[in-house]
Image (tube, rainbow, N blue to C red):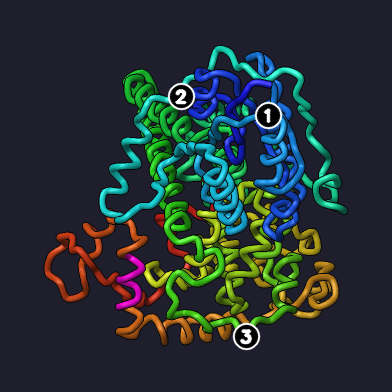
Amino acid sequence: MASLQLLWFKRDLRIRDHLPLLLGSKAGTVLPIYVFEPSLWSSPEYDVSHFEFVRQSLVELDQNLRRLGGRLAIRIGELPDVFIRISESTPIDSILSHEETGTWLTYERDQRVARWARTCGIPWKEYPQNGVVRRLKSRDGWAASWARRMSERQAECPDHVTVPEGFDWGSVPSIDHVVPNGGTALGDIQRGGESAATTTLESFLADRGGDYRGSMSSPITAESSCSRLSPYLAWGNLSIKQVQQATARQLGNLTCDFGNADASQGRSKIRSLKSFMSRLSWHCHFIQKLESEPEIEFQNLCRLYDGLREDEFNNERFEAWKRGTTGFPMIDACMRYLHHHRWINFRMRAMLMSFAAYHLWLHWREPSIFLARQFLDFEPGIHFSQCQMQSGVTGINTIRIYSPSKQLLDQDPTGEFVRRWVPELEHVPLAYLAEPHRMSIGDQLRYRCRIGVDYPCPIVDDKTAVRYAKERIYAIRQTDEAKDAAAKVFLKHGSRKRQFRDPLPGSSTGKPKSVRKPAVKRRKDNNDKQPRLPGMEDF
């Protein structure tokens, strides 16, 4: 069998805007392959829902490759062992793939593959597929680099793919073949694949995203008004460049057609799509943090906060939070919704994580792993950075402690969402819905919801828990040592755009400085302020 190029698919399950596929098809015979790695799929971040989404994506990817004359090889095993077995019967000229910013497991896996390839003299050519810069020396100029990459021409879909003859291609396995007792996917989750991704993008730009800016915060309206593209970006059914360029085209069309449309409606759509576009750059901004410092999957971005919560972890509170039985209706409704859909909107994700970190005083690591399993769109680079951000241990971000009762009043003003997902509260009137434990015994009987029997008592006292959290976090945050540590974190990971908004404390100018200590000003009330950053993986 003639030598070939190994085309390694990872989180890039598509044929469009796929540069390694295009280059491989032009150079000669190529072997497209996806490897199910048991060590990865049995790790605590992954769930059967992720597996099902990937399985669906691979079935379609294979179909698309067949239309081009190719096929997709499927293997189960660890790497580089799978590649070694292939090389024993088929000489490998080179390996082609996209760069991946994944978990520590994939980071170590890539190092093993790289060592084996070097030993064998096999070139491994990796290509960027987003705005993340490998071996970045400085954050200065990162935004301009991102913009340049997003403006580059997309890789064309090849006309033909030549694959080796007589190869054992394998087939997409069930999860039990990869992870024993892997389970069965439950709930109403999005379907994987390039066609579903394209349809979702088109419907958002043409219609659903018209009120994205005004509807993204409520779990009721966000389900349809958010782009719902995050799982397709996380698993590579679409590239970020495809989404950015399609959005830019739609914005251009809206601007041209503005005179023919209703003025207020046209302005709303333009504002919404501009807001969405800004989150596309933030998407890569957060992934860059993990690329530059892989250890933040496990350790605080600002190490001064080490030991803050670790010794006080309360497992009973953690289990109640995971089940959606905390006695805080908005928290419980969001968690149960998440269990069913494996998705929830940005603001509610931030609230769930904030509640775990501040009200329950849980270290971010265990809640982040649980949420990773729940989020179909689990994107490691965004996920771990955001979980730390919502827990107040980055040193450079505003402390935001969400009030669950206020979020219910603001985002579910009729109680529709809470009553649907917490049916124990179905008959509780709106006046008590945010805090049902305040009902009298008579009202509990009248509304068929006995607190502590039908629905749990709050597992913590709201005011006491928040006061304790603020005292602990600000005791560190307001020190000079914390400000110095924050300056170092900012230098490595901070968005340089902020330099023009937040001058140094005591400075009379907003001019950028080479090293700047972010202000650690304690607001009188910063709870529930609308964050300017994207929440978790979601768009």
Figure check: 429 above or below 137:
below
User: Disc 3 vs disc 2: Cβ atoms closer than 8 Å?
Assistant: no
What is the magenta range? Answer: 484-490
Q: Residue at x 71, y 42 (%)?
A: 82
Q: Badge 1 is on which residue?
A: 90
Figure check: 160 above or below 21:
above
Q: Is residue 308 magenta?
A: no
Give the side of residue 338 with respect to residue 410, left or right. Answer: right
* Whether residue 514 is visible: yes
Q: Badge 2 is on which residue?
A: 155
Residue 16 drawn at (x, y percent): 54, 24
Give the side of residue 525 with respect to residue 189, left or right. Answer: left
Q: Residue at x 75, y 51 (%)?
A: 38
Q: Residues within 10 Å of mark 3 (few under 14, many from 20)?
A: few
The amino acid on which the numbered mark 2 sits, given as a three-letter code, is: Ala
Residue 36 drawn at (x, y percent): 72, 43
Judged by depth in the image, the label closer to the viewer, 3 or 2, is 2
Q: Residue at x 51, y 54 (%)?
A: 381
Q: Earlier in the sequence, mark 3 or mark 1?
A: 1
Q: Earlier in the sequence, mark 3 or mark 2?
A: 2
Q: Is residue 486 magenta?
A: yes
Q: Badge 3 is on which residue?
A: 312
Q: Earlier in the sequence, mark 2 or mark 1?
A: 1
The amino acid on which the numbered mark 3 sits, given as a three-letter code, is: Glu
Identify the element where label 2 is drawn.
Answer: loop
User: In terms of depth relative to the viewer, which is nearer, 479 or 161?
Assistant: 161
> Residue 70, located in which quarter of the rendered image?
top right
CA gap, disc 2 and disc 1: 28 Å
